[in-house]
Image (cartoon, grey):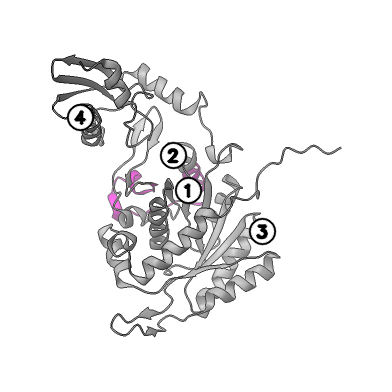
Amino acid sequence: MLTQDQVMDALSKVLDPEIRRPLTELKMIDFVEIESSSVKVGVLLTVSGCPMRTEISDSVKSAILKLDEHLNISIEFSVMSDEQRANLRLHLKGGVERENPFNNPNNLTKVIAIASGKGGVGKSSLTVNLAVALTQLGRTVGIIDADIYGHSIPRLLNALGAPTMVEGMMMPPQNHGIKVISTLPFKKGGVNEPVAFRGPMLHKMLEQFLVDVWWGDLDFLLIDLPPGTGDVAISMAHLVPTSQVIVVTSGHEASAEVAIRAGVLAHHLKQRVIGVIENLSGLVVPETGQVIDVFGMGAGLEIAKQLSAATNSNIDLLGTIPIDPQVRLGGDSGEPIILSHPDAPAAKAIKSIANTLSVMPRGLVGQTLKIDPV
C-alpha cells in the first residue's frame, strides 16, 4: 500500500523550474491524498499566473509514477498566501532584504564580463553559445544582458518572457537551462521601444539585475557588456569587484585597437582579464575546407600579447571562432549553434573555450583577504 511518506519522498526530488529547489523544501506541496490506486496532490504556486504550471505538473506526475506506473494521479493547483510568499522569501534570502549575493565572500559563482571595444564582433551571440556550452558541461549558468540600450540576449536565447515577481524577487525567464535578465521585460512598448537612460540610471538598472533577481546557486554568471569603455563597464567593476573579463575582437586592426582599450580599462578597474577571443576569424568553405580571410585574422593573439604587456600579467588567446552563417540563423530562431549544429567548426571552437573556462580558477582579484597586519 502506497504511503504519504513514499509520495513525499518522491516529490522531494522534484525541483521548482525557476528556483531550482525541491518543492518540498519550498513548502509548495499543500497536501497528498491517497485512495486505492489514486493519488491527489495539492501544489501551491507562487503566483496565480505562474508560467511553469505545466512543467511542474508533468514533473510531479512523473516522480509519483516511478513508484507505481499504474497510479491515477491528479494535481490541484492553488496559490500561496501573502504569509506563505513572505516565508518563501525569508527562506531564500535568509532574512536579508537587499543584498548583492555576488559580493558575499562565501559566494562561489564565477562572474565573467564579456567585453569588446566596438560593436559588431559577435559578442552577444558568443555569450549565449558559451552559456549553452557550459550547461552541457553540467554547470549552472545565468546571463545578465547589460547592454541596456541594445539588448539582444533574450532573442538569441528565445527567452522573451517577463520575470515572475514573488515578494519583490524577480524569477528570471529561462531557456536551454539558462536564466536571463535584460531591460526587455520592463519596456511597455516592447522590443522597439528605445531606452533613454543616463549614467546613474544605467548603474541602478545593473544593480537591480544583481540584487533583485533570484539567481539561485550559479556556477557562472556571464555579463554581456555593451561595447566600449563607458558607464556600464565601470559600474560592473564597482558592483562586482571579483568579476573577471574576457575581451572579444574580430581579426582586423580597427577592432583590435579598441579591444585593447577595453582590456586596459578592466585592468585599471582592478579586474582580471582572463583571456581574449577572436571571433569571425575566417570563413570555412564547407566543400573544400579552405579558410577565406573576410574580416582579417590573427589580431586576437596580438591583442593578448599587448594586453599582457600593458597589465604586466599573462593573458592568453582562449580561442579563435570562424564565421558560420548558422550562428546568425540560430540567433534569429533562438536555437544557438551549439545545439543546432554541434559539429560545426564554430561550435567546436566555442566548446573548447567553455572547457577552458570550466576548469579555470576563480582567482582572488577583488576579494577581501582575512589577514590582519601584525
The residue at 25%/34% (across/down) is 59
Give the amino acid type for the residue marked by disc 3 in the picture.
Answer: His
Task: Give left or right: position of 347 versus 319.
Answer: left
Q: Which residues are magenta?
A: 179-207
Q: Which residue position is annotated with label 1? A: 221
Q: Which residue position is annotated with label 4? A: 65
Find residue 210 and report its horizontal and vertical position in percent. Answer: 49, 42
Q: Which residue position is annotated with label 3? A: 268
Marked residue nearer the N-terminal end (2 or 3): 2
Select label 3 or label 1 by which is in front. 1
- Looking at the figure, which quarter contains the C terminus? top right
Residue that sits furthest to the right in the current view: 374
Q: Is residue 170 above or below residue 276?
A: above
Please give the label number shown on residue 215: 2
The residue at 29%/69% (across/down) is 326
The answer to whether residue 226 shows anywhere in this view is: no
**Number of other residues with Cα within 10 Å of mark 4, as a class: few under 14, some 14 to 19, many 20 or more:** some
Find residue 303 and report its horizontal and vertical position in percent. Answer: 58, 73
Select label 4 or label 3 by which is in front. 4
Q: Quadrant of residue 231?
A: bottom right
Please give the label number shown on residue 277: none
Determine contact: label 2, label 1, CB under 8 Å.
yes
